[in-house]
């Protein structure tokens, strides 16, 4: 009797134990499923939120940059969005990098924006001329940065009260200035590419012209004040001809100190240039026509050979940004090719 009861009790105990273990197993499995679902939900949440790999990446903030100017260094903690330029060449620099100044002066001689920039300057507010910037108009624009030249030294303190003012040398090489704008606008690679592309462009043209012109001389002249201004090898536009493109200057044009020299019409035969780029605008059109009607002019070698090329003064000596400079090189290529 005792053994029978004990056997029954043992069977009951084993059955209970099996049921208990089954319940634990079920509970464990449910817990595992919940954990998997939670992980999946968390992954989905991360994907839908800031970790979404399909969302556009935020641009990296620009690190502070320090630019050297004539008035010392200026440090920019962020990319300025509202820039006023007090020389049109700086508008050219910005436009070459795909940016537009908020405000710009115009050249005094033209009293208008340069035609070669076309519609790129449509939304730019004009703030006076290069010679006389309109301070009130500049104040009204509330700029983040003003870019001026040494010509504006007299109003520098007033400009500084409006916004940080970077003063650049007006005759500084445009390539150096472009790289500075690359820093200012957080586009150093784009600026360097423009410089590299120009280098390749003039190198290719230099090879072509060297083979075609041999030792023929090329002069850059501008009738003015009853005389003729001969731009020398030191002049920054003439340097495109002589340095960048390797063309040969007339001996009279070789000068390491003065950027130009005034010569009379009577001296032109001594210049003996095989080719002449003649700069003309409304201010010297009548004087140019007067010279062209003289026997001296008509008998010049470049004239009799139809090697005189009339170009726009402002385009060639007024605007020293990459857009203008590349157009000048194109015009040289068209004339001499």
Image (tube, grey):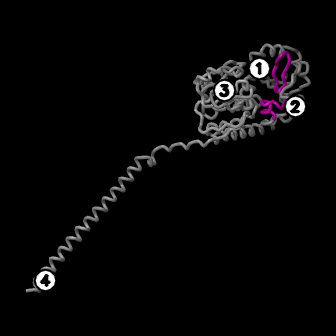
Q: Which residue is mark 2?
A: 255
**Marks 4 and 1, how far apart in space?**
126 Å
Question: Height in image: 81 above or below 119?
Answer: below
**Marks 3 and 1, how far apart in space?**
34 Å
> Residues at badges 2 and 1 in contact (C-beta under 8 Å)?
no
Residue 239 part of the magenta segment: yes
Across and down, in percent, residue 273 comes to 86, 27
> Residues at badges 4 and 1 in contact (C-beta under 8 Å)?
no
Residue situated in front as seen by the camera: 122 or 76: 76
Across and down, in percent, residue 151 comes to 74, 26
First in sequence, mark 2 or 1: give its number: 2
Residue 170, visible in the rendered structure: yes
Element carrying mark 3: helix
Residue situated in front as seen by the camera: 29 or 226: 29
Label 2, residues with CA under 10 Å away: few <14, some 14-19, many ≥20: some
Q: Quadrant of the C terminus?
A: top right
Across and down, in percent, residue 49 comes to 41, 46
Label 1, residues with CA under 10 Å away: few <14, some 14-19, many ≥20: many
Marks 4 and 1: which is nearer the front? 4
Q: Which residue is mark 1?
A: 280
> Residue shown at 71%/19% (left/top)?
108
Apparent side of residue 19 relative to residue 182 in the rendered image (left or right): left
Element carrying mark 4: helix
Q: Which residue is mark 3?
A: 159
Q: Quadrant of the N terminus?
A: bottom left
Marks 2 and 4: which is nearer the front? 4
First in sequence, mark 4 or 3: give its number: 4
Q: Quadrant of residue 269?
A: top right
First in sequence, mark 2 or 4: give its number: 4
Marks 2 and 1: which is nearer the front? 2
Residue situated in front as seen by the camera: 61 or 294: 61
Q: Which residue is mark 4?
A: 6
């Amino acid at each position: 009797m005792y053994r029978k009861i004990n056997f029954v009790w043992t069977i009951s105990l084993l059955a209970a134990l099996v049921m208990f273990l089954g319940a634990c197993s079920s509970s464990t499995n449910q817990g595992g499923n919940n954990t998997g679902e939670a992980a999946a939900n968390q992954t989905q949440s991360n994907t839908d939120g800031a970790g979404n790999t399909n969302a556009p990446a935020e641009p990296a903030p620009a690190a502070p940059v320090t630019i050297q100017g004539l008035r010392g260094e200026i440090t920019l903690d962020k990319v300025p969005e509202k820039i006023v330029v007090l020389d049109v060449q700086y508008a050219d620099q910005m436009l070459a990098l795909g940016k537009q100044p908020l405000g710009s002066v115009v050249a005094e001689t033209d009293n208008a924006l340069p035609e070669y920039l076309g519609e790129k300057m449509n939304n730019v507010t004009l703030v006076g001329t290069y010679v006389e910037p309109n301070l009130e108009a500049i104040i009204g624009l509330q700029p983040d940065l003003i870019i001026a030249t040494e010509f504006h030294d007299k109003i520098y303190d007033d400009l500084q009260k409006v916004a940080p003012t970077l003063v650049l040398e007006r005759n500084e090489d445009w390539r150096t200035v472009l790289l500075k704008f690359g820093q200012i606008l957080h586009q150093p690679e784009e600026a360097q590419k423009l410089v590299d592309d120009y280098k390749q462009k003039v190198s290719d043209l230099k090879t072509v012209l060297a083979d075609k012109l041999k030792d023929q001389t090329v002069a850059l002249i501008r009738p003015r004040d009853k005389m003729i201004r001969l731009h020398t090898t030191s002049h920054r536009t003439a340097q495109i001809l002589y340095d960048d493109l390797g063309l040969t200057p007339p001996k009279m044009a070789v000068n390491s100190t003065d950027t130009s020299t005034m010569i009379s019409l009577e001296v032109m035969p001594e210049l003996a240039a095989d080719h002449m780029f003649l700069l003309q605008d409304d201010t010297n059109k009548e004087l140019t026509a007067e010279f062209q009607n003289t026997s001296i002019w008509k008998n010049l070698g470049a004239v009799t050979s139809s090697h005189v090329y009339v170009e726009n003064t402002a385009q060639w000596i007024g605007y020293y940004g990459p857009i203008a400079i590349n157009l000048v090189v194109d015009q040289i290529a068209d004339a001499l090719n």
